[in-house]
Image (cartoon, rainbow, N blue to C red):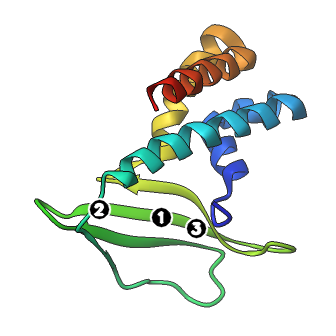
Amino acid sequence: MPNVNFQRMTASAVGPNWRKATPEQQKRLQEEFKTLLVRTYAGALSQVSDQVVEMKPLRASPEDKEVIVRSEVKGRGDPIQLDYRLEKTPGEGSGWKIYNLNVLGVWLVETYRSQFAQEISNNGIDGLIATLTDRNKANAKKG
């Protein structure tokens, strides 16, 4: 978790509407999106066993501020592509932080961006917050 930039990930998923949200709405969006992602991916990763993650060669230079780290999860069946977009962050708590993931060729932020844009168009930013909150409550009940 400390290696994920949830603010950038959320802002990217919300798109241009992020700038229209109040600081409180931004905080709520980030909290709910983080909860959704942690539950979704922690659940998926808990199913993984007897598999190996193979890191691909990194193509980057020391002055790069953003990089893509490519990997494959190998085990039973075909390998699963798992890539990360990282940014170099300055200041306290600095270092490389993940702000997007690619699973099997689909970037997470772009997937959510279209869903979030539709919800905001229909029900506004508060509607998106409510939808994420409801989804997280439903997921919590499922375990």
Contact between marks 1 and 3 (CB within 8 A): the answer is: yes
Q: Which residue lies most toward the bottom here? A: 62
Q: Amino acid at mark 3?
A: Leu
Q: What residue is shown with label 1?
A: 84
Q: Amino acid at mark 1?
A: Tyr
Q: Position of residue 138 (x, y in %)?
A: 52, 21
Q: Residue at x 29, y 62 (%)?
A: 81
Q: Which residue lies most toward the top here? A: 122
Q: Residue at x 74, y 17 (%)?
A: 126
Q: Residues within 10 Å of mark 1 (few under 14, many from 20)?
A: some
Q: Relative to 18, is 3 on the left or the right?
A: left
Q: Amino acid at mark 2?
A: Gln
Q: Position of residue 125 (x, y in %)?
A: 73, 20
Q: Position of residue 75 (x, y in %)?
A: 18, 67
Q: Relative to 105, is 50 on the left or the right?
A: left
Q: What residue is shown with label 3?
A: 86
Q: Relative to 12, is 78 on the left or the right?
A: left
Q: Residue at x 47, y 50 (%)?
A: 42
- Separation of residues labelled 1 and 2 (CA atoms): 10 Å
- Separation of residues labelled 1 and 3 (CA atoms): 6 Å
Vertical position of residue 87 compared to residue 54: above or below:
above
Q: Which mark is residue 57?
A: none
Vertical position of residue 37 compared to residue 104: above or below:
above
Towards the viewer: 22 or 53: 53
Q: Position of residue 27 (x, y in %)?
A: 81, 37
Quadrant housing residue 67: bottom right
Q: What residue is shown with label 2?
A: 81
Q: Secondary structure at mark 2?
A: strand
Q: Secondary structure at mark 1?
A: strand
